[in-house]
Image: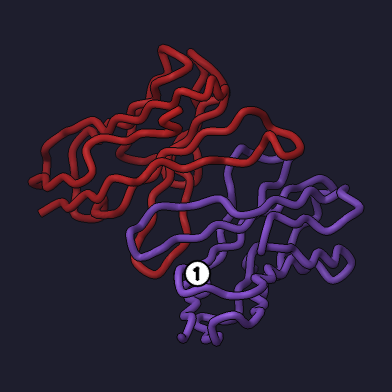
């Protein structure tokens, strides 16, 4: 199993540009989520999904959209990039929501720089 | 009030010695999960260990153990026989099961293992 994969690894955008960060998992996990990590901080939840066709907002959702058409994929779209969105983005997945199944496994991250 | 507090921004440990990384948490939810993640300089988030709020025994995973003191709301990570490869940032995180899916992260502790 590849686990959780993310592309691209690194991206530079100009203010106002849009782009999609890709995330895929091959563990048949129901739950997927997107976090951002800013310098010197822990991660903050952007959006999450409890299954195909179901998404919800996290702590910092403004400026981002998500969709979940399949169990495997959970792309994150930046609608109009702003310098404040410069960050490292992590995708994560878990099998369930109780016991050890709630453990979230993270992808390698995407470093985004918005100029 | 912070939900997860890691009071040690940085720590040193001698190779082959044990080290304890502190984590206290704040929740009124009786059902929650506690997690430790390691983030090496390469940037990925690596899951280390999980403790459920109803688990009777402290969790162990190889050289990692979690000193769970529920009444004190602490979940300290103990790393035994430290190795040079243990040098990294360590994050404590919590998921409150009656709220959203999000993990709440502490600010992290940077551990440096000395040869």
Give above or below for B51 relative to B91: above
Q: Which residue is mark 1?
A: B86
* In this view, A14 is above or below A47: below
Q: Quadrant of residue A13?
A: top left
Measured as percent of width and height from the top left, residue B46 is found at: 50, 52
Q: Is residue A40 left or right of residue B60?
A: left
Work out whether residue A86 can be spotted: yes
Horizontal side of A54 relative to A103 (left or right) equals left
A2 over B91 or under it: above or below: above
Q: B59 or B10: nearer the eye?
A: B59
Residue ID at (66%, 79%): B18
Q: Residue at x 65, y 70 (%)?
A: B79
Which of the 4 image quarters holds residue B26? bottom right
Query: What's the residue at 61%, 62% (across, down)?
Result: B92
Residue A9, given in percent of the width and then of the height, sits at 23, 43
From the rendered image, report the letter of the chain displayed in purple. B
- Which shade is chain A? red
| x and y, in percent, of residue A98 in the image | 74, 34
Task: Examine the rendering and report whether any part of residue A57 can be seen.
Answer: no
Mark 1 secondary-structure assignment: helix
Which one is in front, B19 or B76?
A: B19
Residue A37 lies in quadrant: bottom left
What residue is at 63 percent from the left and 41 percent from the top?
A103
Residue A111 lies, in percent from the top left, at 25, 50
Q: Is residue B7 above or below residue B74?
A: below
């Amino acid at each position: 199993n590849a686990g959780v994969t993310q592309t691209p690894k690194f991206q530079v955008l100009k203010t106002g540009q849009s782009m999609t960060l890709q995330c895929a998992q091959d563990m048949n996990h129901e739950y997927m989520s997107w976090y951002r990590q800013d310098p010197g901080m822990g991660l903050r939840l952007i959006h999450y999904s409890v299954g195909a066709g179901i998404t919800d907002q996290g702590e910092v959702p403004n400026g981002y959209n998500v969709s979940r058409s399949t169990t495997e994929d959970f792309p994150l779209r930046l609608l109009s990039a702003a310098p404040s969105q410069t960050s490292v983005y992590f995708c994560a997945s878990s099998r369930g929501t109780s016991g050890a199944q709630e453990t979230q496994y993270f992808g390698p991250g995407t470093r985004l720089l918005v100029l | 009030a912070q939900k997860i507090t890691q009071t040690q921004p940085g720590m040193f440990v001698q190779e082959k010695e044990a080290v304890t990384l502190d984590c206290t948490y704040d929740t009124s939810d009786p059902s929650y999960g506690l997690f430790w993640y390691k983030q090496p300089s390469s940037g990925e988030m690596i899951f280390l260990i999980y403790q459920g709020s109803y688990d009777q025994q402290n969790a162990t995973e190889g050289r990692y153990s979690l000193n769970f003191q529920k009444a004190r709301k602490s979940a300290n990570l103990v790393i035994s026989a430290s190795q040079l490869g243990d040098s990294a940032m360590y994050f404590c995180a919590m998921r409150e099961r009656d709220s959203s899916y999000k993990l709440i992260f502490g600010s992290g502790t940077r551990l440096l293992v000395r040869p």
